[in-house]
Image (cartoon, grey):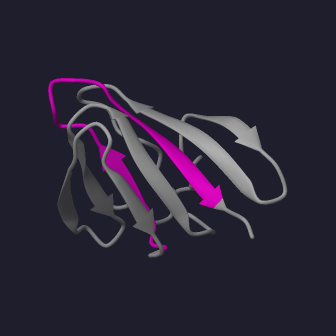
Amino acid sequence: MSAQNKPLGEIASHVLFENDRVKVWNLVVEPGEASDWHMHERDYVTVVVEGAGLVVEYDDGTREDSPSEVGTWRFHGDHRVHRVVNDRDTRYKNVLIELKA
């Protein structure tokens, strides 16, 4: 599936905190659901707080499995249009910290 010619959405579910150095989001994806197609403008870190991973779909049609467990963290510096899909049986939730400075 591709996001071509569609407006991009929010990068996560809602903002928890923001100041001049960071913006902290919460991402919640229920089983069988997907995030909006989006692209991160800044580098960011994610920390998994619930669930067992997602599938990442890119706008060029490629997909990759992103297994994880509670407590897993990742630094993300790659900025491509994508969305995440929860193909697992449990809700997925992470905290996403955008680095502004």
The answer to if 52 sits in the magenta stretch is no
Query: In this view of the protein, which residue sits in the foreground, 101 or 3?
Result: 101
Q: Which residue sits at x=67%, y=37%?
A: 15
Q: Quadrant of the N terminus?
A: bottom left
On the rendered structure, is 54 left or right of 48?
left
Query: In this view of the protein, which residue sits in the foreground, 61 or 98?
Result: 98
Query: In this view of the protein, which residue sits in the foreground, 98 or 58?
Result: 98
Q: Which residue sits at x=53%, y=42%?
A: 12
Evaluate whether residue 11 shows in this view: no
On the rendered structure, is 70 left or right of 64?
right
The answer to if 92 sits in the magenta stretch is yes
- Where does the image place residue 29, in percent across and percent down from the top left? 37, 32
Q: Which residues are magenta?
A: 79-98
Q: Is residue 36 above or below residue 56?
A: above
- Where does the image place residue 25, in percent across and percent down from the top left? 60, 41
Q: Which residue sits at x=24%, y=29%?
A: 32
- Where does the image place residue 85, in percent across and percent down from the top left? 28, 43
Q: Is residue 4 above or below residue 10?
A: below
